[in-house]
Image (cartoon, rainbow, N blue to C red):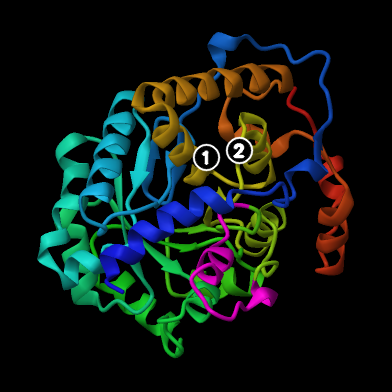
């Protein structure tokens, strides 16, 4: 099977396998504030991940590219939406374009359609510094996202089977580039141990890519003759992963992604410790079903809803959300306590004066 055909298969299976409500956000409840003492016109959605300044914590996370005309059209449409709504966008893995120059246009279109916006490149942890530089140059990327996808590769019939030296390669990429390097999981979450290792080599931000969103184990199992069903439920729920990463590396920017489907999910991710939230599957479904205008409208509505909820909580900035009290219950509470993280300190946080 060609890489291009596999890329398009991933899109189709991502839509058919869907997403679950297993990301852990249903275990998070805000403590209501009856006297927030703020107005909606005081709310600022601007945020920062690493060295990048964002007008909004929402961004379009890595999805596709390198799959011929179909992925060209998707990336073109997503880039137009990102431009119109002034949000950042990450592309899918650019390795296919580095191996096949014919696929470059499926990525280059993003910068062509969004010449001044924040665009994030993407490669796997097998990449060399030379390939990383080429990926950044291809789309004039403002940052490079290195994705970790061990479970996907193991489930993929033609996937990699060795992951030796990945951290060392990431270190070399960080040292060689003049743009920030982010590291992202692809749906299986990041532990606090992983966050510590990544911080030690100087990455600027961690995208936890938690369990509960698009499930690449299920997608790859659809392509296997004998399924590895044990990987279908493998991973750290997104809510748990955000807290693990933030608790272990407080100074590092955390990006929440993985099963985020509503503005309330986004607000919870930000309150748990994320500085931004990435959406992929949810946005893709709207785009392919209803078109660019519907996706643009949805993003505008999400921004408005975030402002409304931040007003109710008395949080005028994204950073303020990490000061409001929340209750953590259910499996998320159990997971975090078993991992040595005391959830009571989240419920005892002081609401803003």
Left or right: 233 in relation to 72: right
> Vertical placement of 265 versus 214: above or below?
above
Task: Return the residue nearer the eye: 309 or 90.
Answer: 90
> Vertical placement of 189 versus 262: above or below?
below
Residue 128: image location, x then y, percent: 26, 79
List the residue tagged with mark 1: 282
Locate residue 162: give its quadrant.
bottom left
Task: Return the residue nearer the eye: 283 or 221.
Answer: 221
- Is residue 224 inside the magenta stretch? yes
Residue 284: image location, x then y, percent: 44, 41
Q: Residue at x 33, y 33 (%)?
A: 82
The quadrant of the image that shows the C terminus is top right
Q: Dot 1, how many residues are within 10 Å of its Cα: few (below 14), some (14-19), or many (20+)?
A: some
Q: Residue at x 44, y 32 (%)?
A: 289
Q: Residue at x 82, y 62 (%)?
A: 335
Cα distance, mark 1 to mark 2? 6 Å
Q: Which mark is residue 261?
A: 2
- Is residue 47 inside the magenta stretch? no
Range drawn in magenta: 213-231
Residue 321: image location, x then y, percent: 66, 34
Left or right: 117 in relation to 90: left
Left or right: 228 in relation to 349: left
Q: Which mark is residue 16?
A: none
SS type, badge 1 = helix
SS type, badge 2 = loop
């Amino acid at each position: 099977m060609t890489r291009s055909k596999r890329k398009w298969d991933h899109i189709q299976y991502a839509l058919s396998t869907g997403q679950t409500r297993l990301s852990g956000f249903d275990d998070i409840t805000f403590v209501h504030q009856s006297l927030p003492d703020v107005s909606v016109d005081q709310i600022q959605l601007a945020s920062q991940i690493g060295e990048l300044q964002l007008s909004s914590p929402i961004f379009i996370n890595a999805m596709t590219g390198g799959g011929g005309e179909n992925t060209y059209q998707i990336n073109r449409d997503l880039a137009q939406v990102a431009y119109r709504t002034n949000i950042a966008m990450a592309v899918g893995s650019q390795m296919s374009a580095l191996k096949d120059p014919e696929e470059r246009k499926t990525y280059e279109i993003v910068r062509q359609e969004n010449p001044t916006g924040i665009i994030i490149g993407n490669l796997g942890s097998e990449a060399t510094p030379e390939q990383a530089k080429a990926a950044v140059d291809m789309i004039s990327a403002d940052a490079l996202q290195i994705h970790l996808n061990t479970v996907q590769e193991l489930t993929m019939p033609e996937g990699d089977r060795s992951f030796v030296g990945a951290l060392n390669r990431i270190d070399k990429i960080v040292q060689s580039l003049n743009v920030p390097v982010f590291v992202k999981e692809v749906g299986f979450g990041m532990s606090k141990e992983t966050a510590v290792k990544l911080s030690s080599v100087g990455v600027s931000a961690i995208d936890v890519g938690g369990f509960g969103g698009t499930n690449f184990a299920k997608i790859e199992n659809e392509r296997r003759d004998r399924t590895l069903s044990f990987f279908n439920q493998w991973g750290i729920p997104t809510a748990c992963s955000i807290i693990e990463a933030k608790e272990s590396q407080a100074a590092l920017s955390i990006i929440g992604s993985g099963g985020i489907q509503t503005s309330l999910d986004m607000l919870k991710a930000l309150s748990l410790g994320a500085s931004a939230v990435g959406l992929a599957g949810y946005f893709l479904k709207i785009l392919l079903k209803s078109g660019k205008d519907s996706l643009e409208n949805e993003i505008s509505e999400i921004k408005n809803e975030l402002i409304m909820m931040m007003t109710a909580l008395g949080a005028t900035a994204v950073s303020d959300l990490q000061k409001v009290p929340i209750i953590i219950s259910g499996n998320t509470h159990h997971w975090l306590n078993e991992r040595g993280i005391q959830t009571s300190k989240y419920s005892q946080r002081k609401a803003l004066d």
